[in-house]
Amino acid sequence: MVFYGRKRYVDILDCYLQQNLASNGGYFDEVWFMAHTEDKDDMDWVENLVEKTAGYKIMGKGVCEGKKYSCMWNYAVEDNTIYVKIDDDIIYIHPDAIPQLVHTRIALPHPYAISSNLVNSPVTGMEQYHYGAIHPFLPDPNSRPSFHAAETWRVSEKQKYPEDELVGEYDIFDITAPYRGHPWLLISDDHFDLLKTPMGKYDQHRGADSIAFGAAWKSWGIGAQQQYSLLYNLEQNKMQRYFFGRNIRYPEGSSAPNASATVPGDAKGPGGEQTYDTGFNRYNLNFCAVWGSDIRDQLPIADDDEQAITADIPRRIGRPFLIDTRSVVGHFSFFTQQDGIVKTDLLDRWRAYANEAVCAPGNLKKPWDLICENFRVEGGLGL
């Protein structure tokens, strides 16, 4: 279930969705695009995508456009069915993420829902920081482009952040984008330098706000730093840096969904190796797996579906919300971060990564924006 509204992001996500269709050896029987936008151009685009892609469907059209997200959950109600809810700005899905998430959903019946380990999330972002998955990045200090345009996702292909440009003290909310399309540069591989970055400064002075709505949710700099760190971890083939948590086993007889409405695990299969219990606190609902019967039993879902599914319903029925930390996905932006993150080169990097590692040869993606005159990349898509 892709909660759909923006073609610019789903164009990249499309490669991951097709890779994970059962017809291509994946786990998804179908992909549903849950119509939410009232923008005709965005709807025309997804209708064309669905028409040419077997296994894709549009759901909720004429019903849920412009309404609260709660409307879309009315479709996720079938027995013996796992629904994976995906936001339309998920820009990276690890090859193991969906199999891992599905197996954990089957292996652990007690939790109400299971989330992937989100990159660019307040809660998991700070856990990733303390488990060594975050690296010291800062925005290019130049006021105009200092690099030749390139189609690359590897952060090591840019020079390191110049030491003489480092600033000791600054407010993370005062970070401004130096120019549209700017990169973030690695300071060093020394984690002491994290103290000079947005996430390091936030970790030292978290303030009074709850983590769900604190600086890690508001700051575009914190969101960008998490994503450049993910690109660096991918380049180094060090995705295990994200695997925190433990094998949580709940007591025998813990509440669970109706056994006749789910697919039981055999306690011998994979899943649930490293999980993190959110303790009935709010978490982001960008990418999670839930049984249809569990959604049906709690209808109608409240308008704030994130608060309902990650905290209120789990607390009411005594079944926790879990994160599978081995299921790693990347999230582009909260609306609070949008103005800054769109001025980075991140979307171009995620498109370049998908073209190299995920997209089928006949489904390579091109930038939505006009390419600058005389832009040339040997063997790339800018010719």
Image (cartoon, rainbow, N blue to C red):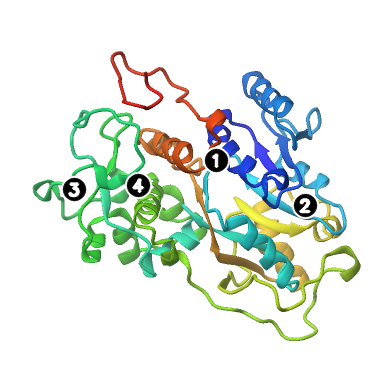
Give the residue type that dot 2 points to: Ile
Q: Is residue 277 above or below residue 379?
A: below
Give me the C-alpha separation between circle 3 and circle 1: 28 Å
Looking at the rendered image, the disc whose residue lies closer to the viewer, 4 or 1, is: 1
Give me the C-alpha separation between circle 4 and circle 1: 17 Å
The location of residue 222, given as percent across then percent down, is 37, 51
Q: Is residue 172 above or below residue 68?
A: below
Q: Is residue 380 above or below residue 152?
A: above
The location of residue 83, given as percent across then percent down, is 74, 52
Neighbour tally class for label 1: few under 14, some 14-19, many 20 plus, Cα within 10 Å: many
Q: Could you tell me if residue 210 is visible in this image?
A: no
Name the residue nearer the viewer: 57 or 162: 57
**Residue at mark 4:** 221
Give the residue type that dot 1 points to: Asp
Q: Is residue 4 left or right of residue 229?
A: right
Looking at the rendered image, the disc whose residue lies closer to the viewer, 3 or 4, is: 3
The location of residue 238, given as percent across then percent down, is 39, 62
Neighbour tally class for label 4: few under 14, some 14-19, many 20 plus, Cα within 10 Å: many
**Residue at mark 2:** 301
